[in-house]
Amino acid sequence: EAQVTQNPRYLITVTGKKLTVTCSQNMNHEYMSWYRQDPGLGLRQIYYSMNVEVTDKGDVPEGYKVSRKEKRNFPLILESPSPNQTSLYFCASSLDSGQGYEQFFGPGTRLTVL
Amino acid sequence: GQQLNQSPQSMFIQEGEDVSMNCTSSSIFNTWLWYKQDPGEGPVLLIALYKAGELTSNGRLTAQFGITRKDSFLNISASIPSDVGIYFCAGVDNQGGKLIFGQGTELSVKP
């Protein structure tokens, strides 16, 4: 089944404790992206990747890192999480970044930073 | 940075009614997208618009790409209970790659 998977789905952590949220897609998509969703603000893009070893900042990259060593995986890293990073995070992928933009979204990861 | 203003923020309607929501931007976008998010899930693409003035339908949904390239609207005709969810507009910036989302319109449909 074609899908985007994220792990974990729920995470409660404490300020400063490094964490990684994994994202994997099985559709051989070139383009992958991370978003955070906050009430009243919609979805905001954190980072995106057009292909392996190519990453770029979205609108809210501060406090986050990503890597794209393989086509299928695009982990989101929070080196030193803070409470303002409490949010619902979505990973998405699409065939490429050209026309079509049918981004397939994962199920979401709800992160709470205490 | 670029921003999209989506309205209304929420709507409560009766089953069978038509619905209209819109998005405006201070910047020009080359592509407009409309997504729907069901509770507890990620957004799913409904309609993609690529040309200014384009009017596109998908079943009971119709969306238009404004002539100025700074706005778009989505209409849902004869709403049904499964239309409940959050609808997002999104614009693709001119460099490609960056997707800017509106704040969302939360739709509730009374049977």
Image (cartoon, coloured by chain):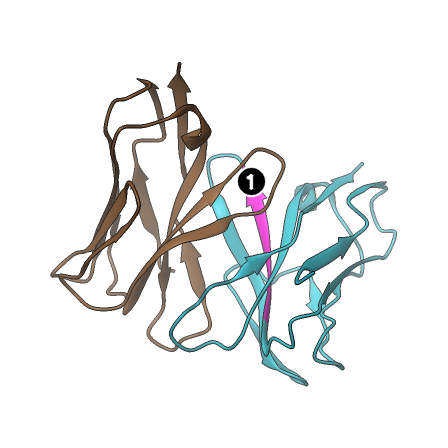
Chain colours: A cyan, B brown
Identify the residue at image location x=71%, y=78%. Answer: A68
Amino acid residing under circle 1: Asp
Left or right: where B44 falls relative to A34 = left
**Residue A79 drawn above or below residue B14:** below
Identify the residue at image location x=51%, y=53%. Answer: A44
Q: How many numbered discs? A: 1
Location of the C terminus of chain B by quadrant is top left
Label 1 resides on the chain identified as A
Q: Between B32 and A79, which is closer to the camera in this rendering? A: B32
Using a 10 Å C-alpha cutoff, classify the residue at mark 1 as few (fewer than 14 neighbours), some (14 to 19) or many (20 or more): some
Magenta stretch? A32-38
**Residue B34 drawn above or below residue A10:** below
Q: Which residue is mark 1?
A: A38
Residue A61, quarter of the rendered image = bottom right
The location of residue B55, given as percent across then percent down, is 18, 56
The location of residue B23, given as percent across then percent down, is 27, 46
Identify the residue at image location x=65%, y=77%. Answer: A28
Check if residue B48 falls in the magenta segment. Answer: no
